[in-house]
Amino acid sequence: MCALTWQGKNHVAMRTVPQPTLLEPTDVILRVTGSTVCGSDLHLLHGVVIELSPGDILGHEFCGVVDAVGSAVKNVGAGDRVVASFQIACGECWYCERKLSSQCERTSGNRAQRTMYGGRTAGIFGYSHFTGGFAGGQAEYVRVPLGDVNLLKLPDDVPDEKGLYLSDVLCTAWHAVVDTGVTKDDVVAIWGAGPIGQMSADFAFHHGAARVILIDRNWRLAFCQSQQPRLETLNYAELPAGTSVTERLKEMTGGRGPDVGLECVAGEYAKGWVHAVEMAVGAETDSSEVLNEMITSVRNYGRVGVTGVYVGFTNHFNIGSLMERGIRLIGNGQAPVHKYWEELLEKVRSGEIDPLRMVTHRVRVEDLDKVYGQFEKKADGMQKVFAET
Ligand code: NAD
Ligand code: ZN
Ligand code: ZN
């Protein structure tokens, strides 16, 4: 079968690889019908997420048709249309019982992860050996461990190109808003106008935000605003010389600052960010340190939620502002998909949520290697892609 493989820093390629087989009685083999590329895949591309080996199959957002099931699988059967959760959860441990499936204790990453973080987090498809070394779904077939837990059936009236995004984006953006505590009348500032930022903006309004200000530097601001006219935008590349994002946000909010800041960027873009291990900083570095910018921008006792993926350590951190002004800094974690996906499926089904708002490109799975470059450069108006198999 064909699959998108990591070949080294800044190099991914389609390769012919062996088809996966059932290894455990709880496994499901899925014939993938839809997949996509996420901002998190770019961290793998750049080698920021460590513990990758050449040939590893990437892809953590995918849907498909059940091809084969192990003897212990009860909830799904051959021919069922399903979407997979990007994280692999057991459904039974202390965290899974509390629907915090991204922290599952039984499917977790490797020793390096536990040493660096002081704790384990759930396995993730196509996301390096740091998070378990599970093969991903940017491929024709994928093995889904614990299929009863990690697959959600899609009803006939939810097509693949809508159901796919329950894997990650929709649950992640919803979690960012809920976990950071966005409530009625909040002024919310969102850093990053990619798919996660765009959906977080929609969901902040959904949770009663009075105003949402989206911050980025490119065409994505106009794209998001064209679909969500209530959205206000701040293009930091167009600020007058000597004006910071923090100053501009204070001006826009009567001097006080937003109640909430959501980090939907990507760790390696932030200048001053230093990895625990040797790393290549992405091609683009910005004039802003996103986290410090968020801390100084929100009002006193404001909340800052971090959904953008940081790996390892950061230095030059404005702990003084955090302490004196009572800033609540919240690590949102990888979003616990299982907590939200049934509720969000119903919202997609009823039309209350429309994931197609972010989908700008449709490609064949064989062309995914080219998509990585396009998505990385934010080129050709690419917000989110649907890759059909
Ligand atoms: P993306 O790469 O498409 O978008 C990131 C955006 O941030 C880009 O438009 C870029 O121009 C913008 N940006 C760069 N520097 C900036 C700055 N200084 N200020 C404001 N904006 C800036 O990524 P995405 O798919 O939307 O994902 C966003 C982040 O969320 C990534 O870090 C991704 O890894 C992470 N993520 C987390 C989870 C989770 O469960 N926690 C799930 C999915 C994605
Ligand atoms: Zn993702
Ligand atoms: Zn578990």
Image (cartoon, rainbow, N blue to C red):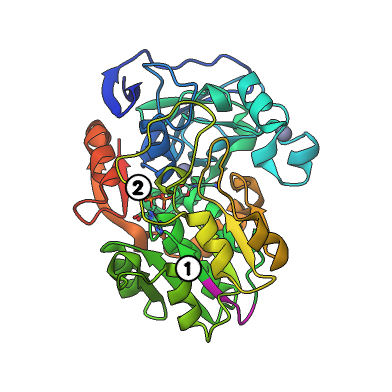
Q: Determine whether the beta carbon of the residue marked 2 sits less than 8 angstroms from the nearest atom of ligand 1.
A: no
Query: How far from the left and from the top, in percent, is residue 71?
Result: 63, 19
Which stretch appears magenta? 184-188
Residue at the far left: name it.
380
> Which amino acid type is shown beneath numbered disc 1?
Ala
Label 1: state its secondary structure: helix
Label 2: state its secondary structure: loop
Q: Residue at x 61, y 61 (%)?
A: 304
**Which badge, 1 or 2, is on the more N-terminal residue?**
1
Q: Is residue 240 left or right of residue 343?
A: left
Q: Kindly report which numbered mark, 1 or 2, lies closer to the viewer in this rendering.
A: 2
Residue at the far right: name it.
94
Identify whether 82 is placed above or below 253. Answer: above
Instruction: Check if residue 301 falls in the magenta segment.
Output: no
Nearer to me, 298 or 56: 298
Which residue is label 2 attached to?
A: 285
Determine if residue 326 is in view: no
Q: Quadrant of residue 244?
A: bottom left
> Which amino acid type is shown beneath numbered disc 2?
Thr
- Location of the C terminus by quadrant is top left
Which residue is label 1 attached to?
A: 201
Query: How far from the left and from the top, in percent, is residue 241?
Result: 30, 70
Q: Quadrant of residue 346?
A: bottom right
Identify whether 78 is placed above or below 272. Answer: above
**C-alpha distance separating marks 1 and 2:** 24 Å
